[in-house]
Image (cartoon, rainbow, N blue to C red):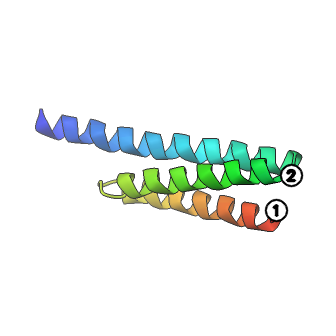
Amino acid sequence: MKNNSSSLQTQNQLFQAQQSLAKAQDAINQAHSHPGQETIKNAENALETAEHSLQQAAEFDNQDAIELVREQLQEQKQALQNLQ
């Protein structure tokens, strides 16, 4: 049972990181569509949240999935930098 619980926790942490990344992508798309100080700040905050979620998920086993999310996060950071 402990192993199953750990697996569920790993999946949950990864899911949360993926959801945070999706919200960051949405915020960056919004900033691209409507560039302004507020939308850019919202995108920056969303990226910080995604980064924090990813750090929490990185403590678990599925490093291939973590690396994929990490790469996607870097792409989104670059997209935001291009906007600024």
Which residue is farthest front?
Answer: 37
Rendered residue at 80%/67% (across/down): 82
Q: Amino acid at mark 1?
A: Leu
Q: Position of residue 22 (x, y in %)?
A: 61, 43
Looking at the rendered image, the quarter that the N terminus falls into is top left
Which residue is farthest left?
Answer: 1
- The residue beneath circle 1 is 83
Picture quarter containing residue 71?
Answer: bottom right
Q: Using a 10 Å C-alpha cutoff, classify the residue at mark 1 as few (fewer than 14 neighbours), some (14 to 19) or many (20 or more).
A: few
Q: Using a 10 Å C-alpha cutoff, classify the residue at mark 2 as few (fewer than 14 neighbours), some (14 to 19) or many (20 or more).
A: some
Rendered residue at 42%/45% (across/down): 14
Mark 2 and mark 1: Cα distance apart in space: 8 Å
Name the residue nearer the viewer: 20 or 34: 34
Q: Position of residue 11 (x, y in %)?
A: 36, 40
Q: Position of residue 59 (x, y in %)?
A: 30, 57
Q: Amino acid at mark 2?
A: Pro
Name the residue nearer the viewer: 31 or 70: 31
Rendered residue at 60%/49% (across/down): 46
Element type at marker 2?
loop
- The residue beneath circle 2 is 35
Task: Tell me if residue 55 comes above or below residue 27 in the rendering.
Answer: below
CB within 8 Å, label 2 to label 1: yes
Which badge, 2 or 1, is on the more N-terminal residue? 2
Name the residue nearer the viewer: 51 or 1: 51
Q: Position of residue 21 (x, y in %)?
A: 58, 48
- Single out the mark in the foreground, 2 or 1: 2
Looking at the rendered image, the quarter that the C terminus falls into is bottom right
Residue 18 bears which disc, if any? none
Rendered residue at 30%/54% (across/down): 60
Q: Is residue 83 left or right of residue 19?
A: right
